[in-house]
Image (cartoon, grey):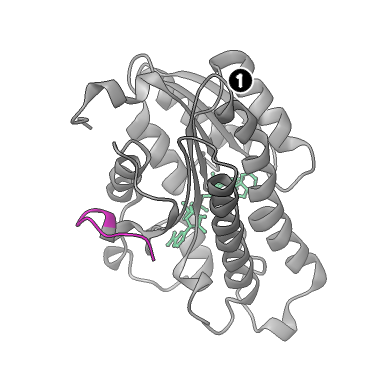
Amino acid sequence: MEFADERFAPERFVLLVAGASKGLGRAIAESWARPGTRIAIAARGEAALRSTRDRLVQRGAEVVALAGDVGERGFADRLVGAAETALGPVSHLCVCASSLGAVPLRPIVDVEDAQWDEAVRTNILGTVRLLRAVLPGMQGDLGGGRLLVFSSDAAVEAYPRWGPYGATKAAADHVVRVLAEELQERRVPNVYAYAVDPGDMDTDLHRAAVADADPLALARPAAVAPLILSLLLRVPPLPSGRYIASELAVGGGPR
Ligand SMILES: NC(=O)c1ccc[n+]([C@@H]2O[C@H](COP(=O)([O-])OP(=O)(O)OC[C@H]3O[C@@H](n4cnc5c(N)ncnc54)[C@H](OP(=O)(O)O)[C@@H]3O)[C@@H](O)[C@H]2O)c1
């Protein structure tokens, strides 16, 4: 991928992708990777994470990979600590790790407590802990940063059987909105917070939710990743807010 202004090329920054072993997170890390780039990645499954790390290293990136669960207390701090020690302060965070709650999807009244817990731990608490862990570094010498949390149309539309996922994604959207207001109120310079709906993509998460979907009707993560990079590396930055990935290509604003 080419950048219009090389002063804002990814080599100058440190990217952290939580949920990078497959799907959109891996595509974003791969689009970012080239000689001189620094990337931290995480996911629970070690083998797939190693394979992503190897692909990024092959492209010339310096990589820190840490296996773990973003919903586990303490993991976000360990991950950001490892990234900062090896690569420097994280300038760009992408939260791609996500839980559907109950698979197969089911009506709200049939979702068990443990399944609600998993959706809340992953999609809300995991997101909050990652945001909290990277922000001090962005406000230090780095002088700025970009925070991006993936949302979904299910955060806005009430789809039957998407209760735990939709409700926790809506909560994560609200976390991003409130954080953006707080950054503005505290006059934190050059830190922007985004929630982005990437649209329907052919990934394991989509297959788990809608087993009979036609893959040809879904976007490939590799086609969505450049739109995400265009938001992360945009100069001047777009205002904090909620965006729809497909609209970024045609200059769409927040909504
Ligand atoms: N695919 C779609 O159609 C679609 C539509 C709208 C929104 N989204 C959103 O887009 C983002 C990316 O989705 P995707 O489809 O690329 O998902 P995916 O293919 O399922 O990949 C999710 C990634 O996150 C990791 N992960 C999941 N839970 C984790 C946890 N608790 N801790 C650490 N890592 C975890 C997974 O690896 P492990 O399982 O090994 O941990 C994997 O690397 C998500 O926020 C999703 O909600 C997707």
| Residue at 81% over, 71% down | 113
Magenta stretch, main secondary structure class: loop
Residue 19 lies, with reference to residue 136, above or below; the image says below
State the SS at label 1.
helix
Magenta segment boundaries in residue numbering? 248-255
Residue 194 in view, yes or no: yes
Q: Which of 214 and 95 is in front in this view?
A: 95
Q: Is residue 4 left or right of residue 68?
A: left
53 magenta-colored: no
Q: In which quarter of the image is the C terminus?
A: bottom left
| Residue at 58% over, 48% down | 185
What residue type is disc 1 on?
Glu
| Residue at 49% over, 60% down | 151
- Residue placed under numbered mark 1 in the picture: 84
| Residue at 27% over, 64% down | 216
Residue 19 lies, with reference to residue 83, above or below; the image says below
